[in-house]
Image (cartoon, rainbow, N blue to C red):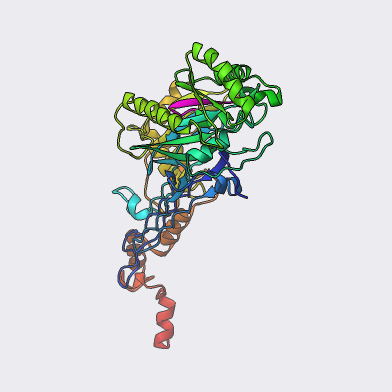
Amino acid sequence: MTTFVDRVVLHLQAGDGGHGCVSVRREKFKPLGGPDGGNGGHGGSITLVVDPQQHTLLDFHFHPHVKGPNGGGGAGANRDGANGKDLVLEVPDGTVVQTLDGEVLADLIGAGTSFEVARGGRGGRGNASLANTRRKVPGFAELGEPGDQIDVVLELKSVADVGLVGFPSAGKSSLISVMSAAKPKIADYPFTTLVPNLGVVQAGDQTFTVADVPGLIPGAATGKGLGMQFLRHIERTSVLVHVLDAAAPEIERDPLADLDAIEAELDAYGGLEDRPRLVVLNKIDIPDGRDLAEMVRPDLEARGYRVFEVSAVTREGLKELVYALATVVEEHRLAQPPAEPTRAVIRPKAVDESGFTVEQDEDGVFVVRGTKVERWIRQTNFDNDEAIGYLADRLERLGVEAALAKKGAQPGDPVRIAEREFDWQPNIGEYVAGPRGTDARLEEESGRATAAQRLAARKARRVRSDDELLHMAADGTVTSVANAQRPVLVTDEDDEDDTGE
């Protein structure tokens, strides 16, 4: 049995960007040929596209979690990582994309209409792309940016020209089955129709679609019965048709009371006041039904309704109803503005991402918010001192330090950007090239000598000053200044041993 699903919650995760690579070109006679680390690939995005062959959201009901592929990492020899392939999810025509709070993100109508709901993360730059005149061989690379993670609600609203509304067992399914090629489930008990049925009707040169909405009962607009979850399917209709059961005396119901009850539910739902209404008195093939139809028709016409007496069994009055609906639908189409060609739905990107704000929260933490600064934080490898120093320089050039000082931040105060919190240390000074992956400005002062200091001391012990060498040569300690560069010194005592004296 086919299941109809018209509302699902999707948990989407776009692909993460690949990490940049740290690499140095090494060839024969070129031990340091320069940085050649490639960039990481971009993560795959997730896009919704309207497919006319899709009629339900059933696939997403069973697979609500969707993950886009990640971008590949960069490699040496300037090899960039592969981009993650974008995922395309096919949805039915009339799908509305909303947030969990009910904010509408996109209304997808028309074959081929698309919407990028989750964007893949940017790939991190390798050290070849980060090299400049100050950092000729960077010892770090950027990390890949995480992809968008979002939960959205997909809600299907059928795109039909005519909507059939009425109480359960009023004959709506029987009516749509004889008007079109639709084959809905038909039985003689209430709530036989559990899902909306769509049918295509041909009336001369005119073609229109009809939607059979599951039966409505008093309180449907507030969630009673089956009507609340299906009322959305008549929002896009051009005309509403009240299908009234003319054989109501057999089930102790009054057609006029049924009409008033359904109208009350449509008013409570809202947004349908401007739709033209037609009334169909069904089941006139039953003797009592024909008599009742003749009795209530004057009252319905007095209210301004166009009334049609039909029988889904004998098809009496069906032709007049179909052509009347075709006329109303055509008038509605002509009154609408010209249809625009189908185009992709996109989210415009910010022209200037350099803006940021600085606020102090109730805990005394200075919070910096901004698209660019938050992306920089996510792309920084905090296990690498050189990468941290590079981030500090970028934040200073952007004006973050000046903004913090203006807000009253003092050295050592906590600052939070994105998910990172750290103690603020302004004015760390100018960058000075050093061993790759290190930044001398971030080294904490201690009593232990650094590797550079120990190397300098070792060279000082090995190489003696010219004044000392000349003094030693004058005293006869060494035979010449040139021999003083050798590791073994020639002394006077050694000369005596060599001559045998």
Camera sees residue 87? yes
Q: How many marks?
A: 0
Residue 157 shows up from this direction = no
* Residue 399 image position (x, y, % from top left): 38, 30
Q: Which residues are magenta?
A: 235-245
Q: Is residue 356 above or below residue 442?
A: above
Furthest residue to the front? Answer: 287
Determine the image quadrant of residue 274.
top left
The residue nearer to you, when weighing 495 against 9, is 9
- Please provide percent x and percent y for residue 80: 37, 58
Q: Is residue 239 magenta?
A: yes
Residue most toward the bottom?
500
The quadrant of the image that shows the C terminus is bottom left
- Percent from the top left, x then y, of residue 159? 45, 35
Q: Quadrant of residue 397?
A: top left
Residue drawn where x is 61% and y is 20% of the image:
255
Q: Nearer the viewer, residue 483 or 204?
A: 204
Query: In the rendered view, does 217 fall on the left or right side of 135?
Result: right
Quick check: is 142 in the magenta stretch?
A: no
Along the viewing direction, whichever of 418 and 360 lies nearer the viewer: 418
User: On the rendered structure, is 338 left or right of 200?
Assistant: left
On the image, the x and y values in percent for residue 341 come to 30, 37
